[in-house]
Amino acid sequence: MHFKTIARKVWHFLWKDNSIWSWLANLAIAFVLVKFILYPGMGLFFGTNLPVVAVVSSSMEHHPGNFDAWWEENKQWYLDRSITKSDFMDYRFKNGFNKGDIMVIFGAKNVNLGDVVVYNDNKYMYPIIHRVVKVDQEYITKGDNNSIQDPKAINTSQIVGKAVFRIPLLGWIKIWFVDLIKMIGGLL
């Protein structure tokens, strides 16, 4: 068979055929492209091995969703650590973010007070994304929606990167997919 004929048949199968096999082939191609080309390419460009993360907890949510109301409810914890309302308003993601959001992460050469960082902790299955609330030789972090700081300080080697951009709600796709896999695994 001639190459052009084969290419036409493959093209038709992938883009015109509406069979289950065509759909499965398209899903496999999409997975390979994202997992092995797009994601590593973004990581290389952004300077981190984890260029995007889905937020899987509500530890950074601000309730009731209004900064002033959130600040009034939480201000004492921050004021006790010399973080003023004015300081906090200058921080990136001053309004927090929600479970189900996607965060775009850049590699972190220097980390400052108020930065939202992603870091690894061997105790947890997923990386943690919290705000830096104290900078010393190590970093103290806290989820904005948590009443206390994280139990252990983290060091530079644990930090994967800094959150720089938020895409609302898109992370729910990952959360639902992981929950579905857990449910199927529990049935087997």
Image: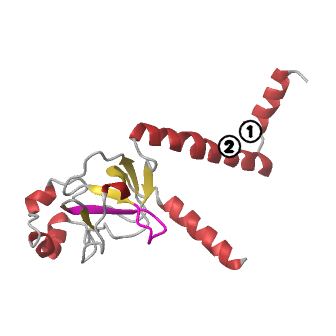
Count of numbered circles in the view: 2
Closer to us: 70 or 135: 135
Q: Is residue 5 above or below residue 54?
A: above
Q: Type of residue at label 2?
A: Ile
Residue 126: in magenta span: yes
The answer to which of 46 and 68 lies nearer the viewer is 46
Is 45 situated left or right of 28 in this image?
left
The answer to whether residue 19 is seen in the rendering is: no
Residue 185 at least partly seen: yes
Residue 14's disc number: 1
**Which quadrant of the rendered structure holds the N terminus?**
top right
Magenta span: 120-134
Residue 63 at x, y percent in the picture? 26, 72
Which circle, 1 or 2, is nearer the viewer? Answer: 2
Q: Is residue 65 left or right of residue 21?
A: left
Q: Which corner quadrant of the image does residue 182 belong to?
A: bottom right
Dot 1 or dot 2: first in sequence order is 1
Q: Secondary structure at mark 1?
A: helix
Q: Which residue: 35% across, 64% down?
A: 98
In the image, what residue occupies the spot 25% across and 51% down? 111
Q: Position of residue 27 (x, y in %)?
A: 68, 48
Residue type highlighted by circle 1:
Leu
Q: Residues within 10 Å of mark 1 (few under 14, many from 20)?
A: some
Pointer 2 residue: 29
Asked which secondary structure carries label 2, the reply is helix
The foreground one among 157 and 25 is: 157
Q: Quadrant of the C terminus?
A: bottom right
